[in-house]
Amino acid sequence: MQTWSLVSICVLLGVVVRWGVSLKSYSGEGKPPMFGDYEAQRHWQEVTYNLPLQEWYFNSTNNDLNYWGLDYPPLTAYHSLICAHIAKIINPEWVELHKSRGYESPGHKLFMRATVLVADLLIFIPAVVLYCFYLSDGSSKKKVSTLLCFLLYPGLILIDYGHFQYNVVSLGFALWGVLALGLGWDVLGSMAFSLALSYKQMELYHALPFFCYLLGKCVKQGLMGRGLFLLVRIAATVLVTFALCWLPFLSDPNQALQVVRRIFPVARGLFEDKVANTWCSLNILIKIRSILSSDSQLYLSFACTLLAVLPTCLRLLMKPTFWQFKLALANSSLAFFLFSYQVHEKSILLASLPVCLLLNDLPLVAIWFLQVSTFSMLPLFLKDGLLGPYVVTSLAFLFFSTYLLSALEHSSEEELRLGVYHKLLFFLPKMDLACIVRWKFYISIAVMACLSVVSAALVPPPHLPDLFPVLVSTVAFMHFFGTFIYLNIVQFSAPPSRKSQKKNN
Amino acid sequence: MADSWSWFPALAVGVSLLKCLFIGGYRSTDFEVHRNWLAITHSLPVSRWYHENTSEWTLDYPPLFAWFEFALSHAAQHFDSDMLVVEKLNYSSPAAVLFQRLSVIFTDLLFIFAARECCRCVQEQKGSRDVLNQPPFILAALLLWNFGLLIVDHIHFQYNGFLFGFLLLSVAKHLQSRHLQGALLFAVLLNLKHIYLYVAPAYGIYLLRSYCFTQDNKDGSVRWSSFSPLRLFTLAGIVVSVCTLSFGPFIVTLPQVLSRLFPFKRGLCHAYWAPNIWALYNVLDKSLTMLGVRLKLLDEAELPRASMTGGLVQEFQHSLLPSVSPFITLVCTLLAILPALASIWWRPRGARGFLRCLLLCALASFIFGWHVHEKAVLIAILPLRRVFVLL
């Protein structure tokens, strides 16, 4: 069968799954007075359509910032404005100032879901297809399999098409950036990433690897010649892109400052809710939030994040290859997720994207991590009534990725890069590490399945009301930390040899 | 990428998971139809099943299907026993929806099994190693991932997958020369949904010709001396015993059951016209009528308004062209299937010829039949996929 027919089938299957998930409820459905992220996006359409640009980020009688005030950078606001114009043509009631608060109807839901699908089809999915075809190794069958698994990743589908968000846009732009950098078009790549940053400030998790890779590349090309020229071009592109995105807000320094204040709310505390990172997990044993002052918490998390992200970035600076870049993206976003300030469980998607890029190279570890990342958001899915889609998409992803990518067959010690572990664990007797890893994988899947059933079916004991979310986030944290260590080790060991690459084809 | 036949579970699991995603989607009145039948068979005594008409969706499938619903209702009471109350019309709690949707997904397992049996009958191409080009894979993909069936069964809501499982299994048994099993399965199928009478002539003529006459002459024509009465009696015995088992408890109320099964008062076309010849006939009638009114040859006041296009299920008369009665549609259908039947009588080509005849019978009945639903085209499409792969 022709490759492009297979690609079309994969994309269409991905779209069918996405649309099937969007039949279910969204966050905050039928829950006044605040509702959820869906209402937030609708409210932003209302605000951007009806109010002049200068008032978007400011508190006023027309714009109550306590009711889902805008807290993403300007590109999100422009996107909401475009959607609002379309909404106005279809049904003006959807974006009427004040009166449309809490508006819910089947027609409106169809419209909002359609906006996500359109953004996905325009930005994210083409990037995924091009990445799988031009930047991954293997036969065309393998590339198609990687494409299908990438498109079936449950976390992104459930958050964007279930809970309701527009991560496909920011992650899509970031992926275009990675794609461009991989193909050697550094200037275009930096432009794409600047767009991603201007859409969601959380893309800062990916900023250091982009910076270090480009800087390292410029240094390698010689800081006195072509390297400097490249550096200047990149810097100029970034500045111009940011300027264009933020242009309307740059006329008045107050405007710019207010936007920054809205998108970086430092007063909110080390963490909210149960999230699978170090601070929340540590909090079970030691109540950090009560021991340290909020300033100390800020400094501690800053210091830890910096320490965690330093090795990977320095290594990338020394060796700016595409393989190192992919690993650094994963390590950097994991470091930020694990140690940073005010992390939400949805931020794991920022780490999932780089790991999806590794589906072809490290299938078993990638599939394992992606499954855990979906599992870590289970409490959120249960709150949104997305248990059915969670089960279906997780089963589908697990089954198809292990089957199509032959993950369990290609899990020898050499393929799993376990050589370094042998050296590190020299004091232990010689064991078949690959077998141990496979067993850990099976046990882990079993534990996640049990916890999922238990969280959905049982009621927690009254003196431990948060038992299940805590268990879920702790189990997820252990996996994330383990993956972080593993990927750092892989980044520092030798790159994949050409012989083993040929064997994988 | 994958060894032999491991792709089959992948296809089956994939489509089953996809079906689960549609659980919360749109469902048509057929959902209420089946809920009503679950309630009737569970709550009422057998004698009342075909007389009950609290709901407008009366039981109009043969008795074996009613027994099937009765069996399902025992599982249903563990999900939501309120759905089994006949008076609760249009009851659709989340548990009820979940149960009914899962019952369709679960009974589709029979369809999946039958598809696998069919794929076993198809020859693998020795030359190509690419599994995507192999006929068994193509057939499995076409059968399991048939989107028409997916939409009708898992969104609109029906049990066609389960029923087609019987049909495909019966065909597979005939292809494997296990004719008695095939006949048994078809007899059961007829007693589950009598629409399969469309293809009964193909079965009848094929079995008579290729099974009851044990040998052929050298040129392929029928050898009358090889007629085996034993085989004929075995076949008849199978059909009669299945029908007795099915209709037995209802023998007293047989006229009522038959009037429910064959409602001829429903009109030539369904509310939504099936794309068959009578649709074209209706269009011709309407166009001629409009032309007649324009040319002042007909009086507009005498004509009925929106007689066939109003979306109602009822009897009506054509305005200009002669009206069509059920007898005429029967004659047309018989004339249409005569060539195919004659072909497998005079020059039988084994089970493949039978399959093609079955397809032609299904298509002919669809094109010329009385009160055909658009969904009936599935009966033609699924065997067509088999024929396509076998050709």
Image (cartoon, coloured by chain):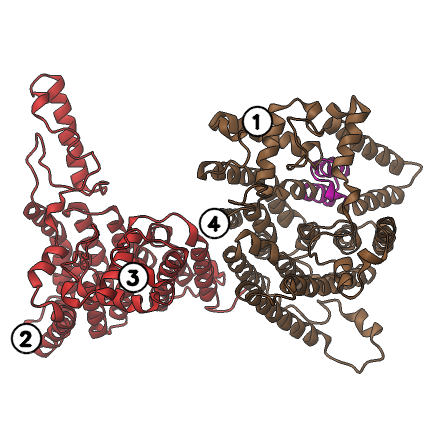
The chain assigned the colour brown in the figure is: A
| Res. B215 visible in picture | no
Q: Position of residue A249 (x, y in %)?
A: 75, 25
Q: Secondary structure at mark 2?
A: helix
Residue bearing mark 2? B225
Q: Position of residue A445 (x, y in %)?
A: 61, 68
Residue under the image location 10 percent in, 49 percent down: B264
Query: What range of the chain is rendered magenta?
Result: A175-204
Chain containing the residue with disc 1: A
Q: Secondary structure at mark 1?
A: loop
Q: Between marks 2 and 4, how big is the CA–CA gap?
A: 61 Å
Q: Are marks 2 and 3 on the same chain?
A: yes
Taking B141 as reference, is B28 left or right? left
**Residue B9 sits inside the magenta stretch:** no
Q: Between marks 4 and 3, how big is the CA–CA gap?
A: 29 Å
Type of residue at label 2?
Ser
Taking A216 as reference, is B276 left or right? left
Q: Secondary structure at mark 3?
A: helix
Check the image and report above or below for A57 versus B110.
Answer: above
**Residue A195 sits inside the magenta stretch:** yes
Residue bearing mark 1? A97
Return the disc, 2 or 3, that comes first in the chain's sequence: 3
Chain containing the residue with disc 3: B
